[in-house]
Every structure is written in C-alpha cells, then in structure tokens.
Image (tube, grey):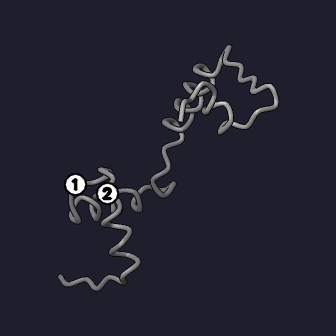
C-alpha cells in the first residue's frame, strides 16, 4: 500500500520519532490505528485520573512564595555575572 502524506503530516511523525514517543513510522501508524479503534479515541480515562491524583499528591504542602518577584528575578538571586 502506498500512502501520500502532506509535509505537515510528515513533520508530526518526525517530531514524534525525535521526541522518543515512537521509534519508527510503522510504530507511529500502529499506535494511531490502535488509538482510533478505541471508542474514546485513545484517551485513557483511568490513566488520566491516576496522573491527576499523583500530581495532587506531589503538590501537597508545596508553597511558592515569590515575595513579589518574577521567576526570572528569583532565578538570578546571588547569580554572579
């Protein structure tokens, strides 16, 4: 089978490979087909719920007080040029 892709589609696949999301074009296509065959389009509600719970647990007790400074200013405190 021969498939023609637009430059934008090719770019999406190459970015997925470079980022490590998939290892090859074949793996990208297989992953897409599996996701599309699922009734929810590949969105895993259980994994999303667990991820949300983990984020909330990690954030417990974390307080960020910038005292009116920007993050950039805070990063440069005691930085010697």
Question: Mark 1 sits on what residue?
Answer: 23
Q: Residue at x 76, y 33 (%)?
A: 69
Q: SS at mark 2?
A: helix
Where is 27 relative to 11, above or below? above
Please give left or right for residue 72 compared with residue 17 in the image: right
Work out whether mark 2 precedes mark 1 in sequence or the reverse, and give the earlier one.
1
Q: Position of residue 48 (x, y in %)?
A: 54, 38
Q: Residue at x 40, y 57 (%)?
A: 35
Query: Is 9 or 50 nearer to us in this picture?
Result: 9
Where is 69 relative to 2, above or below? above
Please give left or right for residue 11 compared with residue 75 in the image: left
Q: SS at mark 1?
A: loop
Quadrant in the picture for residue 78: top right
Query: Is 4 or 39 nearer to us in this picture?
Result: 4
Please give left or right for residue 16 compared with residue 39 in the image: left
Please give left or right for residue 22 compared with residue 55 in the image: left
């Amino acid at each position: 089978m021969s498939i023609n892709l637009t430059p934008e589609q090719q770019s999406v696949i190459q970015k997925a490979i470079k980022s490590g999301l998939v290892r090859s074009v074949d793996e990208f296509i297989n992953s897409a087909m599996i996701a599309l065959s699922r009734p929810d389009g590949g969105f895993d509600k259980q994994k999303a719920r667990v991820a949300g719970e983990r984020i909330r647990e990690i954030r417990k007790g974390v307080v960020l007080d910038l005292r009116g400074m920007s993050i950039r200013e805070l990063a440069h405190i005691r930085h010697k040029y």
